[in-house]
Amino acid sequence: MSFSSFAEFLAMGRHGLYVWSSFGITLVVLALNVALPLLARRRYLQEEARRMRREEMQ
């Protein structure tokens, strides 16, 4: 598929809204698939450190 201008490329033959929103949603899902486990790991390590400190005090 060949486009004669950048505006035509963005419009994607009148399907631009669907195409670009699909790309955007995909990027958001991929970013969440990376970020959420990292945040969960950080939260787990912080909770374990707190638990270890509590056990040391007892």
Image: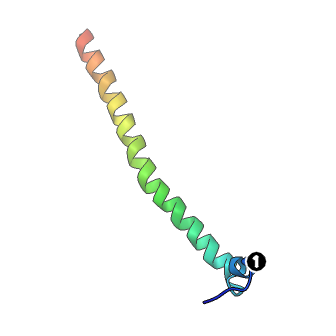
Q: Is residue 45 above or below residue 41?
A: above
> In the figure, residue 11 lies in which quadrant?
bottom right
Q: Which residue is mark 1?
A: 7
Residue under the image location 67 percent in, 83 percent down = 12
> In the figure, residue 2 lies in which quadrant?
bottom right
Residue under the image location 23 percent in, 13 percent down = 56
Name the image quarter holding the N terminus.
bottom right
Q: Position of residue 13 (x, y in %)?
A: 70, 87
Q: Position of residue 40 (x, y in %)?
A: 39, 42
Q: Position of residue 51 (x, y in %)?
A: 29, 23
Q: Observer-nearest residue: 8 or 15?
A: 8
Q: Position of residue 45 (x, y in %)?
A: 33, 32
Q: Is residue 14 above or below residue 21?
A: below
Instruction: Name the amino acid, label 1.
Output: Ala
Q: Observer-nearest residue: 31 or 51?
A: 31
Give the SS element for disc 1: helix
User: How crowded is the residue under tag 1: few (<14 C-alpha within 10 Å), some, or many (20+)?
Assistant: few
Name the image quarter holding the C terminus.
top left
Q: Observer-nearest residue: 15 or 53?
A: 15
The total of numbered circles placed on residues is 1
